[in-house]
Image (cartoon, rainbow, N blue to C red):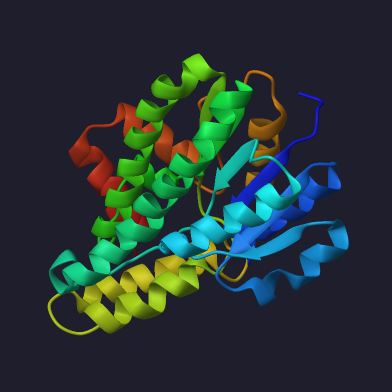
Amino acid sequence: MSQKHTILITGASSGIGFDAARTLAQRGHTVYAAARRVEKMEALKADGVIPIQLDVTKEEDIQNALETIHESHQGVDVLINNAGYGLYGAMEDTPLEDARYQFDVNLFGLARLTQLVLPYMRKENFGRIINTSSVGGKIYTPLGSWYHATKHALEGWSDCLRLEVAPFGIDVVIIEPGAIVTEFGEVMGGPMLERSGEGPYASMAHKMAKTLEREMDNGGGSPPGVITDLMVKATESSNPKTRYADGKWAKQLLFMRRWLSDRAFDGIIKMMIR
């Protein structure tokens, strides 16, 4: 797909979103990079990226962001739903208010944004919805019940949406990162220990914190560029796959989850958290 598109990518203030916004702009696309922390995207302007402020849980922010895009472009050709975060902590220790916010960010916010970009895509008989899920949308880990619930939900939501919008020339693609060097592990680890670092789940929480630091921070994971490469393929391919997966442990974990029994996979996860 050689033509250039108007792209909106959320969660672009750091990590995968930041790297993908820069790369896609360098490839000639018009890229709007959206995040709550708009000041974190200032450096992207040098590559022609247009930063806009957007909290995906706020209707007013969503409306304002799309109006900004419509002022210069008729609509969004490619929506990359990349905003998200990981809520970790024992299910028993996690207030339902926190769990609901996890769903607001990781599922309902992107769903509302998608609802509002679809009319233009249907009109043009072309569009691409690219959803950043996770290997965590297919597997599971202790202390990640609410995070994994959102990613499992996103996988099913995306599959249904793909069938619904296919008659209008719109593709839905799922990206499944493994362990990537971003702020993700740091953002998960601290709050997890605040919730479950003491009490009945303390031993498990401290082991999980060490695992997150080892696998995702301090160079333990794969660089964000491996996922950027997948986003470029999903954006520019004339016939994209329904799913792309890469990053440390991604393909291995997906393979094991597919072929091992639940109890056998439980054992693998327990061995990894030490």
| Residue drawn at (46%, 38%) of the image | 252
Residue 82, visible in the rendered structure: yes
Q: Outermost residue toward the top?
A: 167
In this view, the residue in front, 201 or 57, is: 57
Tell me which corner region of the image, top left, top right, bottom left or bottom right, holds residue 229: top right
| Residue drawn at (32%, 50%) of the image | 150
Tell me which corner region of the image, top left, top right, bottom left or bottom right, holds residue 163: top left
Residue 273 percent across, percent down from the top left: 34, 61
Residue 207 percent across, percent down from the top left: 33, 71
> Left or right: 95 with respect to 41?
left
Residue 111 percent across, percent down from the top left: 40, 45
| Residue drawn at (24%, 46%) of the image | 266
Q: Quadrant of the N terminus?
A: top right
> Left or right: 129 with respect to 187?
right
In this view, the residue in front, 33 or 137, is: 33
| Residue drawn at (46%, 58%) of the image | 84
Circle count = 0
> Left or right: 87 with respect to 171?
left
224 relative to 2, above or below = below
